Image: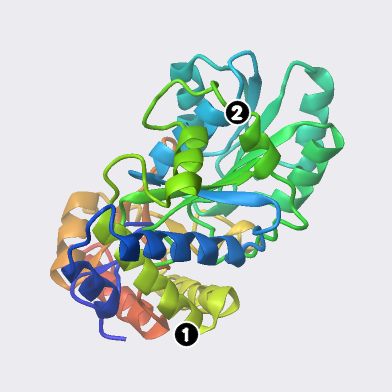
Amino acid sequence: MPPAAPILLTPGPLTTSARTRQAMMVDWGSWDDRFNQLTASVCTQLLAIIHASAGHHCVPLQGSGTFAVEAAIGTLVPRDGKVLVLINGAYGKRLAKICDVLGRAFSTFETAEDNPTTAADVDRLLHADPAITHTALIHCETSTGILNPLPQIAEVVRRHGKRLIIDAMSSFGALPIDAREVPFDALIAASGKCLEGVPGMGFVFVEKQALATAQGNCHSLAMDLFDQHTYMAKTGQWRFTPPTHVVAALHEALLQYHEEGGLPARHQRYADNCQALLDGMAELGLHSFLPAAIQAPIIVTFHAPKNPRYQFKDFYERVKAKGFILYPGKLTQVETFRVGCIGHVDAQGMQAAVKAIAQALQEMEVLDI
């Protein structure tokens, strides 16, 4: 696969295929029947990926994934509701901040950045606070790559009669989630992640009854998922100017997703990428922050070299000059950097990235290989 240089080894935006980029070369009228059919097709295909067609609506929304997370919280959590926010990284903290800004009552439970939240934790917390109406979980925490145990937590939330909101931004399309087995009110993802589209569109899978009873909850006109769905169901159109080129690119990316073999094939390629990365970096003496058991094949956090000559910005620029863009670390206690495993790249591309990393560190006189 020869993607355009540089290769983005980031958790999104990420490297896209030439076909996906080419799809953005057409201008679409936002009220045109063909564009409305494109939107409907995208939503149908997205629902099918998690087997959610029977019980959920797919509500697309302009903007980044965070826009869609805020829309889900604002629409689905009543103004007198309370959210239990599970945190083991930066995106859990962002979710709590959204609750705070929206004026929704919330409590937080925070574990270390290398420690998944457990179902037992959630069971204990829900027992202790009957005021909680919703639990919010980051499935794959992008700040480290940690995978939280979604099915087990979902079952505990269901048993307590509470509602679950899932930020699946970095997992949807690559890690298996089955809406027939995992109960949730909302699962949120975006165009520019594991589906390998371009950024600019979020989407929320909303349980049908939860959405039907959400009228009047939202703090915002633009982010009201109830209004967005009602209008689209009636007219086939977006309420406000849609990201037409992003929708077209996602439609094309979904065609390639199915051609590749759907979720099992996408997961396997990312898993192969991750293993090639881990193996190559270990040979350089660079070790991942997370143990393999909780490492999702999405993005890997590495400990920075313990060498005074190592500076991330210099390292980043040197690797970029060799054709690869990395991500800075997001941890506060330890110096790290991150390498994404997703996007239009394969294991050979990951091996080439490791080679570029080795060369950059040699030039900096950080590694002596």
Q: Is residue 33 above or below residue 4?
A: above
Q: Position of residue 349 (x, y in %)?
A: 33, 80
Q: Name the secondary structure under disc 2.
A: loop
Q: Position of residue 130 (x, y in %)?
A: 80, 18
Location of the N terminus (image quadrant): bottom left
Identified at 46% across, 76% down, the residue is 257
Q: Earlier in the sequence, mark 1 or mark 2?
A: 2
Decide: few, some or many residues near mark 2? Use Cα within 10 Å; few <14, some 14-19, many ≥20: some
Q: Is residue 277 above or below residue 234?
A: below
State the residue in front, 159 or 203: 203
Which numbered marker is on residue 42? none
Which numbered marker is on residue 214? 2
Report if residue 140 is visible in the image.
no
Q: Is residue 77 above or below residue 317?
A: above
Identified at 39% across, 37% down, the residue is 67
Identified at 74% across, 42% down, the residue is 118
270 lies left or right of 127: left
Q: Mark 1 — residue?
A: 259
Report if residue 278 is visible in the image.
yes
Q: Name the secondary structure under disc 1.
A: helix
Identified at 65% across, 18% down, the residue is 81
Q: Amino acid at mark 1?
A: Glu
Q: Position of residue 40 (x, y in %)?
A: 46, 60
State the residue in front, 58 or 261: 58
Q: Quadrant of residue 119 in the image?
A: top right
Q: Is residue 262 above or below residue 190?
A: below
Q: Quadrant of residue 136 in the image?
A: top right
Location of the C terminus (image quadrant): bottom left
Q: Please state the total of marks drawn on the protein image.
A: 2
Q: Tell me the mark number nearer the camera, choosing from 1 and 2.
A: 2
Q: Position of residue 91 (x, y in %)?
A: 47, 38
Q: Amino acid at mark 2?
A: Ala
